[in-house]
Image (cartoon, grey):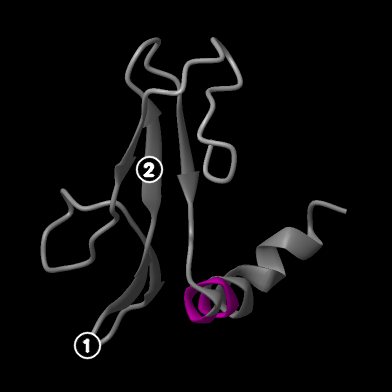
Amino acid sequence: MKSTNTCPKCQSTEIVRIPGQTGPSDTYNFIPISGGWIPTSVSVTRFLCADCGFSEEWVEGEDDLKKAKDRYRQYSQSLK
């Protein structure tokens, strides 16, 4: 949906982009990267089909992708 603007489930083109946010509340959509005195995280953007409700989540920035990969690399090694 992110690149095609078409829902893979119902083929609708009524796609809504909901920007991810990071902040002091757990009501935002994010991936935690580190805790400590200054917690850091990367935001996760949602793409929602306004017709059927199907949604996808994407980390959009290259810097954010690198941060998440570096932080969680150890967990993905165990999936192999």
Q: Please tell me whether mark 2 sits on a helix, a strand or a loop.
A: strand
The residue at 62%/72% (across/down) is 69
Say which of marks 2 and 1 sits in front. Answer: 2
Q: Position of residue 34 (x, y in %)?
A: 38, 79
In the depicted view, which residue is nearer to us: 27 or 45? 45
Quarter of the picture containing the N terminus is top right
Q: Position of residue 41 (x, y in %)?
A: 34, 72
Quarter of the picture containing the C terminus is bottom right
Q: Residues within 10 Å of mark 1 (few under 14, many from 20)?
A: few
Instruction: Give the residues drawn in magenta, as a range.
Output: 63-67
Is 10 situated above or below 48? above
In the rendered structure, does residue 8 fall within the stretch colored magenta? no
Horizontal arrangement in the rendering, residue 43 relative to residue 22 (left or right): right
Horizontal arrangement in the rendering, residue 65 relative to residue 43 (left or right): right
In the depicted view, which residue is nearer to us: 30 or 56? 56
Residue type, label 1: Ile
Looking at the image, the residue that sits furthest to the bottom is 37
Q: Quadrant of residue 55?
A: top left
Magenta span: predominant SS is helix
Pointer 2 residue = 46
Q: Please tell me whether mark 1 sits on a helix, a strand or a loop.
A: loop
Residue 38 badge: 1
Mark before the other along the chain sequence, 2 or 1 = 1
Q: Residues within 10 Å of mark 2 (few under 14, many from 20)?
A: some
Q: Position of residue 43 (x, y in %)?
A: 35, 63
The count of marks equals: 2
In the depicted view, which residue is nearer to us: 78 or 48? 48
- How far, Cα to Cα, is label 2 from label 1? 25 Å
